[in-house]
Image: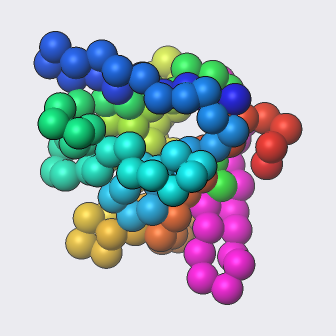
Amino acid sequence: MLRLRFKGAGVSMSAGPNEEFRVEQTKLLNPRGEVLARYDHGHWDVGTERCTRIDIREPFFVRFQGARGLVSTRGPFEFGAFDDGMLVEGADDRCVAKLALQQRMWHDNGDGRLWPLLVLQPPGAE
């Protein structure tokens, strides 16, 4: 199970535990498809709050999904975060993927491909 921690100026909220979280373009969704947050130029809108970072505190995989069932999986990562339009991992915040806002797609830093959807899952669920 994964938990997310939303952080910002005076903001500290959490989501989960859930078996996965999905990020479709700029929307962060829970497994039921409910929008938890929307990314907008450097911050995540969570209800009426603005967060600059979303921490992933448990080990996770990221699965990129595209058209016609194309899938690419990266990880496992010990922990990570969404920070400034990027999915980062580890103590040094190494970039795993970056949101290409013009295309509204996620750029996989490993192979350079663009993906409309990424899914965060704990080890064993991938």
Q: Residue at x 32, y 64 (%)?
A: 100
How many marks do you count on the picture? 0
The picture places residue 39, in percent across and down from the top left corner, at: 27, 50
* 12, above or below 99, in the image: above
Estimate the x, y position of residue 61 in percent, counting from the top left: 68, 41
Q: Is residue 97 visible?
A: no
Give the residue drawn at x 51%, y 69%.
115
Q: How is the image coloured?
A: rainbow
Q: Foreground residue, 89 or 7?
A: 7
Q: Is residue 124 above or below residue 24?
A: above
Magenta span dominant secondary structure: strand
Q: Is residue 41 left or right of residue 73?
A: left
- The residue most toward the bottom is 68
The region drawn magenta spans 64-78
Q: Is residue 24 magenta?
A: no
Q: In the rendered view, does 2 fall on the left or right side of 43?
A: right
Answer above or below: position of 106 versus 93: below
Question: Which residue is painted at 14% across and 18% down in the image?
Answer: 9
Q: Quadrant of residue 52?
A: top left
Please report the residue visible at 69 percent of the width from the left and 76 percent of the height from the top. Answer: 70
Q: Is residue 56 visible?
A: yes
* Quadrant of the rendering where the N terminus is positioned: top right
Q: Please identify the residue farthest to the right as the structure is shown.
A: 124
- The x and y percentages for residue 124 are 85, 38
Residue 26 figure quarter: bottom left
Q: Is 28 placed left or right of 61 in the picture?
A: left
